[in-house]
C-alpha cells in the first residue's frame, strides 16, 4: 500500500467542512466550536451539500482517486463549488509550512516499519486486503494536544482519509499520528467490504477502537500508549449504548484469547452481534 499526502488549501478547507457537517463514521457529528461564522458558515454548508450531490460521483472526494487531484477537483466540483470554496476566508497554514514536512516524514517512517506486518495482521484478523493506495489529507488541528482522523472516500483500490494534528501532539506521543491513521484505514476497509450493516454505525466505531488507535493492533505494532491502555470499556461508552459497550467489552476480552487462531468475523458470528455483520464478502472468498 502506497501513501500519498495532500496539503493543498482546497482539500484542507473541504476537510474542515466535512468535519463540521458530518459524513464520518460516528453516529453523531463531532462538532468543534467553528472558527468562522455568518456568511462563511452558510457558504460552507452549501459547499458540503453540493459536494455530496454531484451526479455520477460519491462526492467531491472522488478527485483523490485520480493522479492529479488538484486538477480533478476543478473538473468534478465545477466552477460553482470551487468558487465558493475559494471564497471562504479560513485561517489555515501555508502548504509549504515545516509542520507538514515533519508530519509527512513521521507518518512515512512509522508506516515503513509496520507495512509488512500490517498486511499480514489485517488478513489474519479481518480477512481483508489493504488498498493499493491511501490518500491522506493533512492539516493542523485546533486542539493543540490532540489529533483527529476521518474517513472520506473509498473505491476498489484507494482509500481517502484525513488526519489533523495539534502542534503539541508529537511532544506527548510521537506514535499518535500512525495510530490514528491505522484506525481510519480500518474504517476504509470496513466500507470497502461493506461488512457492517448500516443499522448501527456506533458498533463499527466501538469495534475498531478495540484494535486502534490505542488497542490490539497498536500494541502489536509497538505503538501502544500507556495513557489509554487497558481501558477499552471507557473508550466505547461514548460511541454506543452502555449495554452494547459492556457486551462488546466482555466479548473482545474473550477474542484476545483466540486472536491469531480465529478471524474476528467468525468469532462475532457466534454471538449476539451476528445481525450487525454483512457476510457477503466472506461468502465470496
Image: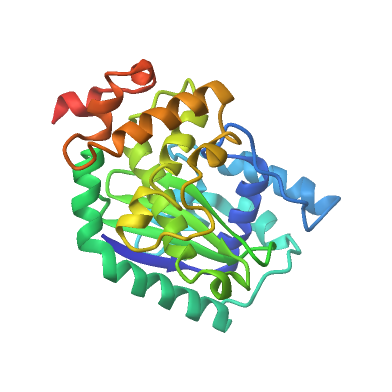
267 shown above or below 18: above
Using the rendered view, name the quadrant where residue 142 is placed. bottom right
Q: Can residue 198 be seen in this view?
A: yes
Instruction: Tell me: 110 left or right of 80.
Output: left
Quarter of the figure that contains the C terminus: top left
For image coordinates 21% across by 39% down, the residue present is 127
Using the rendered view, name the quadrant where residue 175 is placed. bottom left
For image coordinates 56% across by 39% down, the residue present is 234
How many labels were placed on the picture? 0
Percent x, y for residue 24? 54, 41
161 shown above or below 269: below
Picture colour scheme: rainbow
Q: Which residue lies furthest to the right in this view?
A: 38
Quarter of the figure that contains the N terminus: bottom left
Out of 217 and 103, give the one closest to the viewer.
217
Percent x, y for residue 147? 58, 60
30 shown above or below 104: above
Q: Is residue 71 visible?
A: no
Out of 210 and 152, give the one closest to the viewer.
210
Percent x, y for residue 265? 27, 29
Out of 236 and 13, give the one closest to the viewer.
236
Instruction: Tell me: 236 left or right of 194.
Output: right
For image coordinates 33% across by 67% down, the residue present is 111
Percent x, y for residue 278? 31, 23
Instruction: Tell me: 183 left or right of 220.
Output: right
Amino acid at each position: 500500500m502506497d501513501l500519498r499526502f495532500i496539503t493543498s488549501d482546497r482539500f484542507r478547507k473541504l476537510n474542515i467542512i466535512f468535519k463540521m457537517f458530518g459524513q464520518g463514521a460516528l453516529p453523531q457529528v463531532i462538532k468543534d466550536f467553528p472558527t468562522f461564522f455568518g456568511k462563511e458558515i452558510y457558504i460552507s454548508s452549501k459547499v458540503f451539500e453540493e459536494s455530496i450531490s454531484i451526479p455520477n460521483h460519491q462526492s467531491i472526494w472522488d478527485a483523490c482517486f485520480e493522479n492529479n487531484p488538484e486538477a480533478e477537483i476543478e473538473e468534478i466540483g465545477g466552477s460553482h463549488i470551487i468558487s465558493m470554496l475559494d471564497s471562504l476566508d479560513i485561517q489555515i497554514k501555508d502548504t509549504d509550512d515545516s509542520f507538514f514536512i515533519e508530519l509527512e516524514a513521521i507518518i512515512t517512517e512509522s508506516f515503513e516499519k509496520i507495512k509488512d506486518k500490517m498486511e499480514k495482521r489485517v488478513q489474519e484478523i479481518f480477512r481483508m486486503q489493504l488498498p493499493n493506495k491511501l490518500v491522506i489529507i493533512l492539516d493542523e488541528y485546533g486542539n493543540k494536544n490532540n489529533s483527529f482522523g476521518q474517513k472520506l472516500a473509498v473505491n476498489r483500490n484507494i482509500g481517502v482519509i484525513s488526519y489533523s494534528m495539534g502542534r503539541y501532539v508529537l511532544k506527548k506521543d510521537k506514535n499518535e499520528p500512525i495510530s490514528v491513521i491505522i484506525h481510519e484505514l480500518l474504517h476504509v476497509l470496513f466500507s470497502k467490504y461493506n461488512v457492517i450493516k448500516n443499522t448501527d454505525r456506533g458498533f463499527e466505531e466501538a469495534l475498531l477502537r478495540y484494535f486502534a488507535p490505542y488497542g490490539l493492533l497498536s500494541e502489536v505494532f509497538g505503538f501502544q500508549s500507556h495513557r489509554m491502555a487497558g481501558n477499552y470499556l471507557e473508550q466505547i461508552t461514548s460511541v454506543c449504548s452502555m449495554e452494547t459497550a459492556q457486551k462488546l467489552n466482555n466479548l473482545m476480552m474473550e477474542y484476545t484469547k483466540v486472536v491469531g487462531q480465529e478471524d474476528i468475523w467468525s468469532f462475532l458470528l457466534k454471538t449476539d452481534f451476528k445481525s450487525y455483520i454483512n457476510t457477503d464478502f466472506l461468502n465470496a472468498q
